[in-house]
């Protein structure tokens, strides 16, 4: 057990080489995509909406197609089935996601500057948790919209779960939901963190082989 703990301590104390530090810097740049590009897009088609109703979800705002008119039209349709209006004020994620991403970016830079494997693994675990929690929060929001329907609605439908990924048929609407460039940038940052960990582990193995 002592040998294992000593080996683990040496691994965590291993300084990061230029490769892992470079990947951390690239991951930090990827995080900027959250501030400039949408994270998700929902598009709805129906016979009366041949061109579709579109809504882009950013980390801090909603943006409807047709100069914002699509969100108003979606809310009109939601009213008929008793669904709550889609409003920016209901998305608490808009208040914390940009802030949390900024903090994570600073931690990436800290790990790149002070560079040890312990710092790298810390930010990797934190980033994975942030990603999973964000997906859960998005899914819960979608679930809540589809299941909390007003009983006084003029059109009665069963509670439903709007799609998070891919396609789903809802009444006479075909709904498509896909990640956009902002989410791909976040995924790229995760890949870069894993590459940094892999390179750090390889450097540690090489250092151990030289010491032996």
Image (cartoon, rainbow, N blue to C red):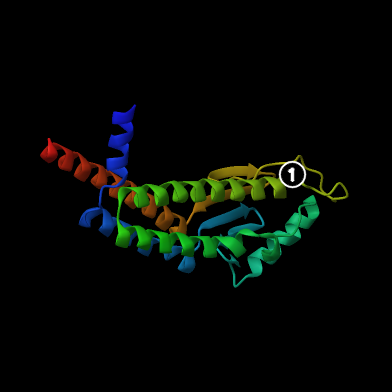
Residue 165 appearing in the image? yes
Foreground residue among 105 and 63: 105
Task: Tell me the quadrant of the picture where the C terminus can be found.
Answer: top left
The residue furthest right is 152
- Picture coordinates of residue 192, whole percent (x, y): 32, 52
Q: How many marks?
A: 1
The residue furthest front is 2
Foreground residue among 51 and 55: 55
Which residue is at a point 61% across and 49% down the rendered structure image?
137
Task: Tell me the quadrant of the picture where the N terminus can be found.
Answer: top left
- Picture coordinates of residue 88, whole percent (x, y): 67, 65
Q: Is residue 159 above or below residue 95?
A: above
Foreground residue among 110 and 87: 110
The residue furthest bottom is 67
| Residue 111 shown left or right of residue 72 in the figure | left
Q: Is residue 77 above or below residue 166?
A: below
Residue linked to disc 1:
147
Which residue is at a point 74% across and 41% down the rendered structure image?
159
- Picture coordinates of residue 139, whole percent (x, y): 61, 46
| Residue 161 shown left or right of residue 187 in the figure | right
Picture quadrant of residue 143? top right
Picture quadrant of residue 17? bottom left
SS under mark 1: helix
| Residue 138 shown left or right of residue 31 in the figure | right
Label 1: few (<14), some or many (≥20) within 10 Å?
some
Which residue is at a point 58% across and 61% down the rendered structure image?
96
Residue 58 appearing in the image? no
- Picture coordinates of residue 29, whole percent (x, y): 36, 64
């Amino acid at each position: 057990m002592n040998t294992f703990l000593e080996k683990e301590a040496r691994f965590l104390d291993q300084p990061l080489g230029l490769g892992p530090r470079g990947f951390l810097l690239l991951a930090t740049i990827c995080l900027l995509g959250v501030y400039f590009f949408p994270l998700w897009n929902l598009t709805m088609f129906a016979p009366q909406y041949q061109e579709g109703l579109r809504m882009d979800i950013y980390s801090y705002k909603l943006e409807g197609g047709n100069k914002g008119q699509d969100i108003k039209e979606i809310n009109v349709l939601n009213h008929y089935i008793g669904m709550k209006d889609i409003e920016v004020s209901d998305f608490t994620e808009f208040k914390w996601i940009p802030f949390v991403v900024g903090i994570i970016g600073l931690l990436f830079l800290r790990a790149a500057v002070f560079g040890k494997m312990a710092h790298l693994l810390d930010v990797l675990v934190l980033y994975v948790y942030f990603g999973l929690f964000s997906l859960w929060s998005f899914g819960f929001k979608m679930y809540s919209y589809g299941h909390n329907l007003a009983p006084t609605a003029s059109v009665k439908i069963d509670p439903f779960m709007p799609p998070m990924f891919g396609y789903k048929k809802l009444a006479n609407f075909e709904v498509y939901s896909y990640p956009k460039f902002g989410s791909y940038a976040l995924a790229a940052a995760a890949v870069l963190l894993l590459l940094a960990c892999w390179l750090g582990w390889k450097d540690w193995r090489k250092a151990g082989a030289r010491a032996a």
